[in-house]
Image (cartoon, rainbow, N blue to C red):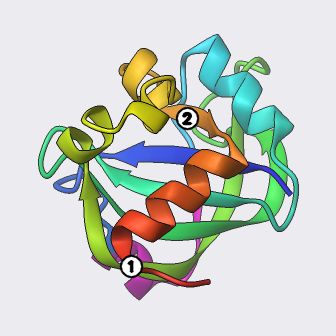
Amino acid sequence: MNYWLIKSEPFKYSWDQFCLDKKTFWDGVRNYAARNNLRSMQKGDLAFFYHSNEGLEIVGIAEVVKTAYQDPTTTETAWLAVDFKPKKKLKNPVSLSQIKNMKKLENMQLVKLQRLSVSAVTEAEFNIILDLSSTKL
């Protein structure tokens, strides 16, 4: 299994809205590194759901339910979408400042590549975030 982080501005698409929808497709990614991450996702992979710009915190865990396909919002074949469903809300959100203050998370792509909207997360980083949030899968 692989682990990821997907970002959304809560005023555009929040965790709460995602839970109400029960499923969504992640579209509109127009960065090649983020697109490559979408392409690498497999069914069953888990992704942290991060509120960007407002909140700046990881609030939940999503699960990949359909792997990469042509982004329906564009005719350009370079861009992809992936379907997710909510898996679990974090017991305690984990803020960007908490992450930046942890030596073990200093190389996390969320910290190193802050503008990347879809990033990879190592298994160790995933487990540290779960511990910080007091969340069990």
Residue 98 versus residue 10 in the image, above or below: above
- Crowding near the residue tagged with mark 2, few <14, some 14–19, many ≥20 C-alpha atoms within 10 Å: many
The quadrant holding residue 35 is top right
Q: Quadrant of the C terminus?
A: bottom right
**With respect to residue 31, does 89 lie above or below?**
below
- Which residue is label 2 attached to? 118
Residue type pointed to by label 1: Ser
Circle 1 SS class? loop
Horizontal arrangement in the rendering, residue 52 relative to residue 68 (left or right)? left
Whether residue 19 is in magenta: the answer is: yes
Residue at image location 57% in from the left, 46% down from the top: 125
- Give left or right: position of 56 versus 72: left
Question: Can residue 26 be seen in this snapshot?
Answer: no
From the viewer's perspective, is residue 10 above or below residue 60?
A: above
Q: Earlier in the sequence, mark 1 or mark 2?
A: 2
The extreme left residue here reads 54
Residue for badge 1: 134
Residue 34: x, y in percent? 61, 25
State the extent of the magenta-drawn residues as a range.
Answer: 16-25
Residue name at image x 50 percent, y 30 percent: 108
Residue 73, position in %: x, y?
57, 38
Instruction: Estimate the x, y position of residue 104 in percent, counting from the top left.
Output: 48, 36
Q: Position of residue 121 (x, y in %)?
A: 62, 41
